[in-house]
Amino acid sequence: MKRQYIHFASLSFLFLLLIEATTTVIYPSALYAQDEEYPPGTVQMTPKVNLDLKEVPLVVPEKFQGMVRDDLTLNLPEGFSVKVFAATGLRGPRMMAFDDNGVLHVANMKAGGASEFQPEGNSASQILALPDRDNDGVADTVIIAADGLRWANSFVFYKGDMYVADTHQIVKFADNDGDLVYEEREVFADSIPTAATPHITRTIEVDEAKELFYVSVGSSCDVCREEDPERATMLAFNTDGSDRRIFATGLRNSIGMDIHPVSGDLWATNNGHTEEENTMPPEWIDIVRDGGFYGWPLAFGYQVWINFDIRGHWRVPPITAADTVLVQSMERPKVLIDAHSSPMAIHFYTDGNFPDEYHNAAFVAYRSGFRGPDPGHKVVALFMDEDGSNAEVADFMTGFWPFPPIQDNIWGKPVGLTTDSEGSLYMSSDWINHLILKVEYTGFGTSIFDDGTGELPLRTTLEQNYPNPFNPTTAISYQLSANSIVSLRVFDMLGREVATLVDGYQSAGRHQVSFDASDLSSGVYLYRLTVGNYTESKLLTLMK
């Protein structure tokens, strides 16, 4: 059977409003013709796979008892454990990096207090050094490596010096005596566009091979025309500070950046605009190319135009011929993930003792999620080819938002990610619990991709219903990687359950159920598959 796709540009505006919620969050394959798998004007979400997460206790070392609850748990693939590495003195810990001597540093963004450089006490962010000299997996002490920053989110080490991305400038620090206190300070790049809100954080990344610094600058609004050409961009500088230029445009708020260890491409995460309904628009994780345009404030996905009739979006029109050319220049995004999940750091895993399938994979932290279709508040693993093709995303560490997902029971906000020389993964939480976690691999897990036969095992996945739109019946297919208790339910857009399709034990394999909506009104509905710790939701449209 030839599958159909919906092309946005060919629809009337009225019909677009009806299907937009469905089409722009469709997960792979259901809306795309076989002879044109991913045409312009559409969105193809990156498929999700299941790592069969297991609940493990959060180990709280004795020195942090009383600071962090000792009854918390997280969900990780088999063979992994997690413990608190640091909690003392942390207030809003954000991006992290190891220096040349293997000492973990973190941007303590919300430290507060006054300093020589911030006498009014406005934010006064710090960079903290957290040495673990006895190698027991716990920070020995907290050293203020650099102080007096306004709103420090990110930093990099380059040729022994530390370059910090503050909200309004890049500051270069030097530690000449090796005591982890950076006594020399100079402004490396000034007059970075800033504002009180939104998007006051700046992220810096260094490409040592190309001798370039990259600095992301977020937009000044949700959707609008910018007056400052350096807003909603990626800036580039030579490592000596020369040749400041706009590297890429149309990036509403790219918070995470990393260099691919094989291709050398610059990858970034991006937070989409927020005033759409809760499935729109998808966030992206993509290669950022020199001269590339990435959609904002005109489009998202693969050349899908923003609906300018929503709230403040009217500030963008009239649309010009130059706007159309820009949108037509947008390349297919490598990875699209659920709306409002707020992807933060992206970190490529290069060397270490994690199983082979994680090598050169990326870890991405989701800081949010309660407004979107995915609960978020987690760390995911991104598996893909060197050029970003054939991407798959999988929950790697969840449990910061225990089930049932009530906003008040969130206990962590993942932001920063990095790995040490042995390959352990570190994650910072900058709110609710201000801490740094260390994820270690014990070596007792099994490969997620190889079951010993050389063939790929089944993975738990939920497919898009077909046909869609439908009247009055449609088929929903899914597959299970193991025998499991399965729940498949349908909800209206107010969150009310309208049908229970599956609720019980099922064997591993592929399953399909029929949904008869004869007694329901036309509209958009959500169906949700829950299998253990795995949950995925999709939208379907009933048109009578």
Image: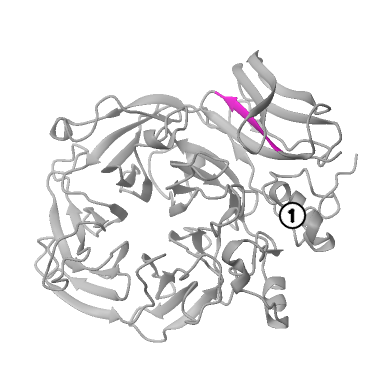
**Left or right of residue 195: residue 393:** right
Q: Measured from the top left, where is residue 461 in percent x and y?
A: 65, 32
Give the image location of residue 180, x and y in percent. Answer: 13, 60
Task: Examine the rendering and report whether any part of residue 295 can be seen.
Answer: no
Q: Residues within 10 Å of mark 1 (few under 14, many from 20)?
A: few
Asked if one can make out residue 55 in the rendered structure from this viewpoint, the answer is yes
Between 225 and 148, the one nearer to me in the picture: 225
Q: Left or right of 261: which side holds 525?
A: right
Circle 1 is placed at which residue position? 17
The residue located at (60%, 58%) in the rendering is 387
Above-or-below relation of 341 to 84: below
Query: Which residue is at 21% across, 66% downward?
Result: 122
Question: Toward which corner of the image does residue 508 lie, by quadrant?
Answer: top right
Quadrant of the frame with the C terminus: top right
Q: Residue at x 52, y 50 (%)?
A: 340
Q: Reply above or below: 273 against 139.
A: below
Above or below, comparing residue 26 to residue 196 in the picture = above
- Label 1 amino acid? Leu
Magenta highlight range: 525-531
Q: Quadrant of residue 170?
A: bottom left
Image quadrant where one finds the N terminus: top right
Foreground of the two, 45 or 350: 45
Q: Which residue is at the far bottom?
A: 243
| Quadrant assignment, res 101 | bottom left
